[in-house]
Image (cartoon, coloured by chain):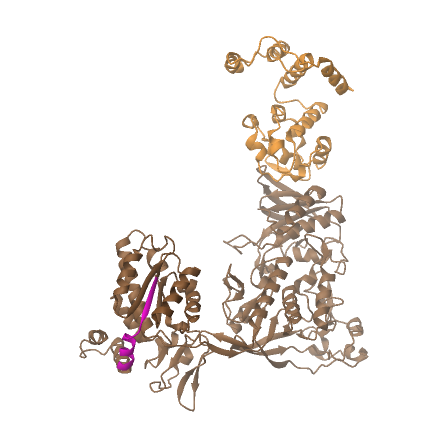
Chain colours: A brown, B orange
Amino acid sequence: MLEDRGAAFGLEGRGKRTREFALSETLLKRSDPRTLSEAIMKKLGVFICHCGVNIAGTVDVKSVAGKMGEVKDVSHSADYIYMCSEPGQQLIRDAIREKGLEGVVVACCSPSMHENTFRKAVKSEGMNPYLCEIANIREQCSWVHQKEKQKATEKAEEIILATLKKVRENEKLEAISVSINRSVLVIGGGIAGMTAALDLAEGGYEVILLEKEQALGGHMTQLSKTFPDLHPALPDLFTKAKGIEMHPGIDLHCYSEMEEVKGYVGNFELTIRKKATYVDWEKCNGCGLCIRDCPVEYVSQFERGLGVRKAIDLLYPKSVPDKPVVHRVHCRYFIDGSCRKCEEVCPEKAIRFNQEDERIGKKVGAIVVATGFDLYPREKLGEYGYGEIPDVIDGLTLERMLSVDGPTKGKIIRPSDGKVPKEMVFIQCVASRDPDRYMPYCSRICCMYTAKQAKIYKEQVPDGQPYIFYMDIRSDGKGYEEFLQKTIEEKGLLYLRGRVSRIFQDNGTVRVLGVDTLTGNMVEVAADMVVLATAVVPSDGVKDLAAKLRATVDRHGFLTEAHIKLYPVESSTKGIYLAGCGQSPKDISDTVSQASATASKIQALLSTDQLLQDPLIAFVDEHICSGCGICVEICPYEAREMDSRRGISVVHSALCQGCGACIGACPNFACELRNSSSIQTLRMMDTFV
Amino acid sequence: MEALTNMEKANKTFLEEVSKRSGEKLSLCYQCLKCTAGCPTAPNMEFRPNSIIRMIQMGKKQEVLGSSAIWFCVYCQTCGTRCPNEIHIGVLMDALREMAMEEGVHAKEKNIHLFHEAFIQSVRRGGRAHEVTMLMEYILRSRDLMKGSLIPGVKLFLKGKFPLLPSFVKGKGEIKRIFEKCKK
């Protein structure tokens, strides 16, 4: 039959030499008549699943089973209500044992559902698992042809016949075993990364923790108290940070970034860039004299513009690690060489103006990406007077005010004149839930932190009045709704359901015009201060990092998970795991839960030192390969490499994902996919056309 | 109600005042509208029960006390039974009516006070309301012939809902004592 096809492709050998003709010619030369005759002798089994009524309701399974039994090398054909059930699998095992089957086709649902189930079942009877194939007659047949039962039955027969053709030429394959490095890299030293790192280190795995800032803690260090229990954020955080600093299993690299990642699950090779701190941290005793004497002050990003910091400074007081960094762009030594004050006062002689960035190489088996979030940037939000009116601030700025060790020592005051605000407006969903102009998603933390901030405000200013403009209140965590209702009842917060239309300065106040849809009225508030709950967005540089890791991000820049429900902490790239707000906005409780889930997943992955991988990957016919290198360029997984000694291209079996890109690209048909060879595919196509 | 609520001029103590007087936790209301959904008189109110609570939260004292809605409430307790936050709007309405009378806010419904008084008198006499004598008293005092209610009235009479003779409860003395205690 294949000869006929070859002839048909090439117009009986004459006329144009099409690619198809060349392909079939090559394949014909390659196909060994001996293997074919052997294949015909194979004893095959066909098992047809009813899937309740999912398949049997459309396809006449009995007649299909009967017809399959008549195919000459099929020595067993059966149907059963649920093949995937234990009795169903037993049918397959019994048939293999009694009839000595050499290949099995299970006609059922998609292979992504139960291929593994049936491969395990045949394996338990001593059959090579790769001699078991799935014929998908549910998703690709019965579900889509529910109104054409006769035709669906015919199609199901063809699908099974085609799969039989494939299985006749399947090779016996063994899973590829790859040795793995049992240490983990965690990128991001916020609450997510810290939790994952500690969990993994407690589990006995070596952890490398990377933090781009000079100290641990992430955004949580900027918070005052946390909902719903109003615990201060810092003490809990310090316990964790200290635990990390002291842990013998955690190799902490602050002020460091990821430069390059190579390799694959189990064997990643990293290049970490340790940025120059211009301070010898080994020698520094944290006395703080340098900070005291540094003459340069500049606006602190950490204090959200409310405070200043020195050119040599800690990230925040009592930070972990409590070592200062010289900030080159602000330091007078680096600007014009006019000052060496810190160097003069340092009792340990730890200042190193000549320090340079350092690159270190590391090897790990898995990577956790816990890169966290930022708030929607001020300059992109052309609304609510944000950035123009000094008394319009965002939620994180208010958090700094509420922090006892913050720039205002915990006092809520107007940035413009330092007065205590008596009328305070909070606006929720700023740049969130606005698909047209900003972010379509809900930022998830704002409802609760706004209620918390309004509560603390009311406790601090009992005669003040908080107004909260909202669209919906989302309080879905444990104890959140109770916290909210209790706060509203006790503190007399006035929730106004509606949006704000205008904010402008008027005689020392910030006038807020909005609407209360519950009364249907326009509302006007002469506010002293306005707090915007701006949207949570992925932190800067996540896209670049994701590209280095070959992980994917969604259109907003959040890292995408392998499956939103079933694999929420795995990225789409094997060995790369996710935790925290880098994946989606979430509060501290959810972040910590997710980080621990990530840590457990990795512990399971690294529980052995050998990783078994599917052998259904590409291979190269060394006699045909001309070494043109097209496959090396096209491979999305960097799994193809040139063997310069032999002048051919080789497949890196641990990296190859079996996508087939090189097979399509190879001009000489030298590449093939194991158990999905071109000849198998052509024979399957024969059945259908 | 004015179209623009200026929160500067809003009566911020009104919510506190009403909450204290009625004993209801009015700030808990999240506008689920369960009360209004079950209220038999809501279709006739210019502000529905949920709106009344919202207006109290927004400090709209004059509008609330001057509304006819607070006089339409028949204290059937459907709202209070169903409210997820245990706000008894019947009790609230009572408190609002008292406040309206104390403040001398003129009710929108001209003779509503007389109607309520006639009802109370009827209860005082027999321990339960007797519609015929109660309505006679109301009509005589208000000179309102209730023309609009004539047809429903006849229908109710034909169904035997308007007994001509009043029936009295057993403990008339106790009723008397309740009234005396209330006066104190």
Q: Nearer the viewer, residue A665 or A97?
A: A97
Q: Left or right of A195: which side holds A437?
A: left
In reply to whether residue A12 is colored magenta, the answer given is no
Where is residue A322 shown, x and y percent of the image?
Answer: 74, 71
- Residue furthest bottom as drawn: A645
Q: Is residue A268 above or below residue A522?
A: below
Tell me residue A114's x, y (percent): 42, 63
Q: Quadrant of residue A673?
A: bottom left
> How many numbered badges does the structure rendering display?
0
Residue B116 lies in quadrant: top right
The residue located at (76%, 66%) in the rendering is A317
Queried whether the magenta region covers residue A45, the answer comes back as yes
B107 is higher (above) or lower (below) than A451: above
Q: Residue at horizontal 61%, vertical 44%? A: A513
Quadrant of the frame with the N terminus of chain A: bottom left
| Drawn side of residue A336 relative to residue A442, left or right | right
Say whether residue B35 is visible: yes
Quadrant occupied by the C terminus of chain A: bottom left
Whether A519 is drawn above or below A66: the answer is: above
Magenta range is A32-47
Task: Note whether A378 is above or below B180 in the view shown.
Answer: below
Task: Note whether residue A385 is visible.
Answer: no
Which of the 4 image quadrants contains residue A671?
A: bottom left
Q: Which of A554/A120 is in front? A: A120
Query: Whole-percent x and y of residue B183?
Result: 76, 19
Residue A382: give x, y in percent of width and height. 57, 55
